[in-house]
Amino acid sequence: MTTFSDITPELEKQAIELPSWAFGNSGTRFKVFGQAGVPRDPFEKVSDAAQVHRHTGLAPSVALHIPWDTVDSYADLAKHAEDNGVRLGTINSNTFQDDDYKLGSVTHSDPRIRQKAIDHHYRCIDVMNETGSRDLKIWLADGTNYPGQDDIRARQDRLADSLSQIYARLGEGQRLVLEYKFFEPAFYHTDVPDWGTSYAHTVALGEKAYVCLDTGHHAPGTNIEFIVAQLLRLGKLGSFDFNSRFYADDDLIVGAADPFQLFRIIYEVIRGGGYGNPDVAFMLDQCHNIEKKIPGQIRSVLNVQEMTARALLVDTDALRRAQQEGDVLAANGVLMDAFYTDVRPALAEWRASRGLPADPMRAYAESGYQQRIEAERVGGTQAGWGA
């Protein structure tokens, strides 16, 4: 039987990248809600992200979004991150907030607009060269709203051509990670709607192209852990965007809607060799609309850590025996026993043994950091969607 002390070496391997945009103002399609103390530039975003790592030891890197996180000197931003105990990570492109892209970006029928979108990705690769980032993550809003609006197959051809040009610009040790999304903002068809489409394009591109799986980007009832298992089996799972959904792409705190699903996903990650594997990046992608930004991120990484601990506690020998014997109830019981194990007290003790707060949420609340930034960050323009 696996005990908590057996899994602590594995817990040491966990690293979850934070999204810079989670620290800015966000909201719904109808309203962006402002909060006191929200960062006004990428330097303040990195400072806030560093607080999550300081209190949890789980979040050593920060993903950037271009052009939201454009700065005069990425060397200075990288130095600022290092001074705060973190580093810069994935570079995310943005081809969904320009009027030219209303009908598509890299799949647009107009060669001028396609080239504009390709050039933006070239600029993102330039940023990667300056920050030392490994991954260029591409999520596309491209698609159509009405049957007949455009030629679906031709858009796939244009997508393949555009991606191949971007891929050719990657340097040594750099990767392209292609995200998919079932729908929104395109409602009739999306150009990269599912893992199969992303997989087909990344296979065609080559060994430096991978699939990004966002846990909120699927049709209701989709077995996400099956997709995880399949992509790991195929060697094409490059990264996760962890969040929670009740209805669609809700971008809520990971584990909030269905902790058991998160447990099942992470179990398959471990089973498939993706945990502690540098080729499979864990990242959050969330928008804290009504909750405070920093504690929202702290809660999320702790939820991932908790479900990881439970998944590591699965008695794999007992599970294998039950599966081989065809004992359905025993096999399911092994998983459920691990899922229902309350690992929170043991995790608190383990954190304390490593010099971290036993209760990171409480420690942050008592640190005074939130009160300080709310008092100091007066004036200027707060970061948010589009900045």
Image (cartoon, helix red, strand yellow):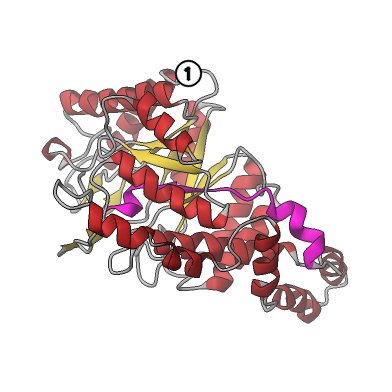
Which quadrant of the rendered structure holds the C terminus? top left
In this rendering, would 325 be left or right of 170? right
Q: Which residues are magenta?
A: 4-24
Q: Residues within 10 Å of mark 1 (few under 14, many from 20)?
A: some
The x, y position of residue 330, in whole percent, is 80, 79
In the image, is residue 20 part of the stretch drawn in magenta?
Answer: yes
User: In this rendering, does residue 25 appear at all?
Assistant: no
Q: SS for tag 1?
A: loop
Looking at this view, is 73 or 277 the one in front? 73
Residue 238 percent across, percent down from the top left: 54, 41
The picture places residue 328, in percent across and down from the top left corner, at 77, 77
Q: Is residue 246 above or below residue 81?
A: below
Image height check: is 90 above or below 361? above
Amino acid tagged 1: Gly
| Residue 335 is covered by the magenta coloring | no
Q: Residue at x 18, y 28 (%)?
A: 113
Which residue is at a point 43% across and 39% down the rendered structure image?
178
Image vertical order of residue 94 relative to residue 285, above or below: above
Q: Would you name the residue on which mark 1 appears?
A: 171
Quick one: quadrant of the N terminus? bottom right
Q: Is 303 positioned to the left or the right of 176 in the image?
A: right
* Residue located at (27% from left, 46% from top): 141
Q: Is residue 384 visible?
A: yes
